[in-house]
Image (cartoon, helix red, strand yellow):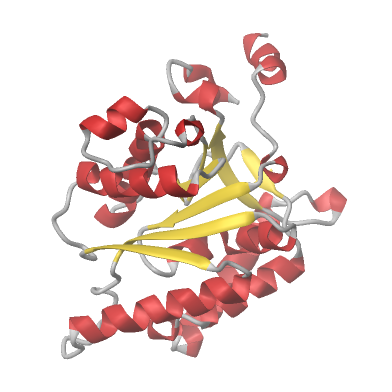
Amino acid sequence: MLIPILKHFVPIPDLTKCQRFCFVGPHPDDIEVGCGATVSLLAKAGKDIMFLVATDGGAGTSDPNMPREKLVETRMEESKRSAALLGVEKVAFLAFPDGGFYTPVELAKKMAAEFIAFDPDVVFCPDPKMPSEIHPDHLKTGEAASTASLISAFPLMAAFDGIEFDKDHPEKFRYRTLAYYFTNRPNKIMKTTKADYLKQLEALKCHKSQYGNKDDFDSLSLYLNLRRMAMGFKRLRCSGEGFFVMAPTHQHCFPEINRY
């Protein structure tokens, strides 16, 4: 009885009614894999969108002779082209070392500064609690983005952490909705279309350093298609991407959100 009542009075927000979105990715292609169709959907609706990439992508190759600096430059350019194809103009790179020994706290401070400056209503990031995830960049990025979202709600916390910000705009300090992708516990489906899925694939093709092999790309395309159909509402003839979404009220001392 309690959960239905809470769902009514403390609902999961309708993300399509928000205006500003920051999509956080561990590597230059993760946003497109995790929620590229949703980016397409929101961009078509005229939303303000930013991509924030945590690492430099400098370990994303099986070629031991590839110069790291060259790969970093290549992947950043691929990310910019992919974002532009999806309708996103603002792309920022924090350039932490791909697979390197940085901490979530260090990453969170850099992210918080970006959140305060861009002031998103919603932050998309990987689910830091995904049981099967073993990549440290994904886990640290999800944890850091969650912490950064909290830091960006409190100016004194940000100042204590050494984050510089414009004190003339205190309205930018506020709680933000969190939407986790790469999650095993989706509680919200974004109803994307086949056109959004096809745009997602076009964006992924920009990442030639990662998906230059046709068989690999075809396998990924098949997986994404199966995933969108599984998440969608068949009776409504639409598909979707699933996220674990928490409004500000759900993010602290609200365990019931895990049963929504």
Task: Kindly give the residue lying farthest to the top in the view shown.
Answer: 1
Q: Which x, y percent locates residue 153?
A: 42, 30
Q: Which x, y percent locates residue 18?
A: 66, 42
Total residue callouts: 0
Q: Is residue 61 visible?
A: no
Task: Kindly give the residue lying farthest to the left in the view shown.
Answer: 101
Residue lying at 16% horizontally and 53% vertically, measured from the top left = 102
Of the pair 43 and 189, the residue shown nearer to us: 43
Quadrant holding the C terminus: top right
Q: Quadrant of residue 17?
A: top right
Q: Is residue 132 left or right of residue 236?
A: left
Q: Which x, y percent locates residue 83?
A: 53, 71
Q: Quadrant of residue 156?
A: top left
Q: Which x, y percent locates residue 103?
A: 18, 47
Residue lying at 34% horizontally and 46% vertically, measured from the top left = 113
Quadrant holding the N terminus: top right
Task: Kindly give the residue lying farthest to the right in the view shown.
Answer: 236
Q: Check the image and report above or below for 192 versus 19.
A: below
Q: Is residue 195 left or right of residue 153?
A: right
Residue lying at 64% horizontally and 30% vertically, measured from the top left = 12
Residue lying at 67% horizontally and 20% vertically, measured from the top left = 7
Q: Is residue 207 left or right of residue 72?
A: right
Q: Check the image and report above or below for 49 versus 98.
A: above
